[in-house]
Amino acid sequence: MTGGPFCSGMVFFEVGPMKFVLAPYNGSLPQLAYNPYSWSKTTSIILLDSPVGTGFSYARDVEGYHDIGDFSFSMHVLIFLNKWFTDHPHYQSNPFFVGGSSYAGKMSPIIAQHISQEIELGKQPKINLKGYVVGNPVTGSDYDDNFRVPYAHGVGIISDQLYEAAIRNCKGSYIRPTDKMCARVLNTFQNLVSEIDVSQILGVNCIRGMLTHRFLSEEYIQLSDPSPEQPTLDCFSYRYYLCNIWANDDSTREALGVKRGTIGEFVRCKKSIPYTSEVPSSIKYHFNLTSRGYRSLVFSGDHDLVIPFLSTHAWIRSFN
């Protein structure tokens, strides 16, 4: 699953088997190529667009788009998996891992715990759950936010002087400042990092001025809705621009079997559907699963300032 929420990975982004050929757009259908680094070379992967409304996923009734949040997200995925394994029983014995990045990294252990509970209750189909995989995972906890300042200093984005002022005035707490001087230091920090792409600090910053007190998630920073202006080829969001063109082509939809009338304009990341983050922290789900013997693979890109690896290290260490 891809982050967001409401961002579609399709088969082109992250670990998917395909990628777009990066060439200047000439009005024709964007070309595709195989991704040589796809995880599908060694594993069987279900690339799921969730929650409902993401990508080409849809609800038959408009009420299905109401009250969407962490709980409905996780239960819808569980219902989908139960139906999928019922329809494909020959896969039930395969070792199964739930996987997700960014915001889906928050949801993956929650979904895995739901599956484990159904296994304990003896419900069918019995999914052979072995663990979960998360990349630069959101947890929803203060860990996510509090290590951005130390990380930014560690990679040389902010000066020693600013970092020392942050330590002195914020005393290790870099969120929800109550001290006036701490708030001033953090405001300076926000202004500085607004000049870079916080999801890839070495990348080209194609969208400026979108930084809030609480960082926007990776997908929303890159490109949430079709931009009225075509991104330049060196922007990572150029891939998303091509994706929107490709997915809105009639021949594409016919080839994919998208039912007419179910989806209007395809948008890779939808901000128009309200979402409620009901689970304040996913850390207890990580702890519950690993304590019960399930395997976890947690990986982090070291150029991510949205969920820096220091944040992930910190909550893992809290388990002793």
Image (cartoon, rainbow, N blue to C red):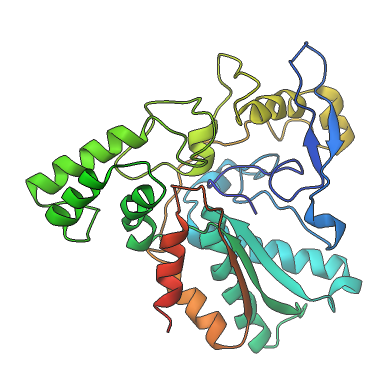
Image location (x, y in percent) of residue 310 = 42, 61
Q: Which residue lies furthest to the right in this view?
A: 90
Q: Can residue 157 be seen in this view?
A: yes
Q: Compare residues 128 and 121 and report the one nearer the observer.
A: 128
State left or right for residue 218 relative to residue 95.
Answer: left
Q: Compare residues 200 and 47 and report the one nearer the observer.
A: 200
Q: Is residue 272 visible?
A: no
Image location (x, y in percent) of residue 32 = 84, 31
Q: Compare residues 232 and 228 and report the one nearer the observer.
A: 232
Image location (x, y in percent) of residue 209 = 37, 26
Looking at the image, residue 310 lies above or below residue 201 = below
State left or right for residue 45 relative to residue 3.
Answer: right
Looking at the image, residue 273 lies above or below residue 174 = above
Residue shown at 77% from the left, 57% from the top: 46
Looking at the image, residue 298 lies above or below residue 193 = below
Q: Residue furthest front?
A: 160
Residue shown at 84% from the left, 62% from the top: 44
State left or right for residue 46 relative to residue 280.
Answer: right
State left or right for residue 187 relative to residue 132.
Answer: left
Q: Residue furthest left?
A: 180
Image location (x, y in percent) of residue 88 = 88, 67
The N terminus lies in quadrant = bottom right
Number of marks present in the image shown = 0
When asked about the image quadrant of residue 282, the answer is bottom left
The C terminus lies in quadrant = bottom left
Residue shown at 16% from the left, 60% from the top: 171
Residue shown at 48% from the left, 80% from the top: 287
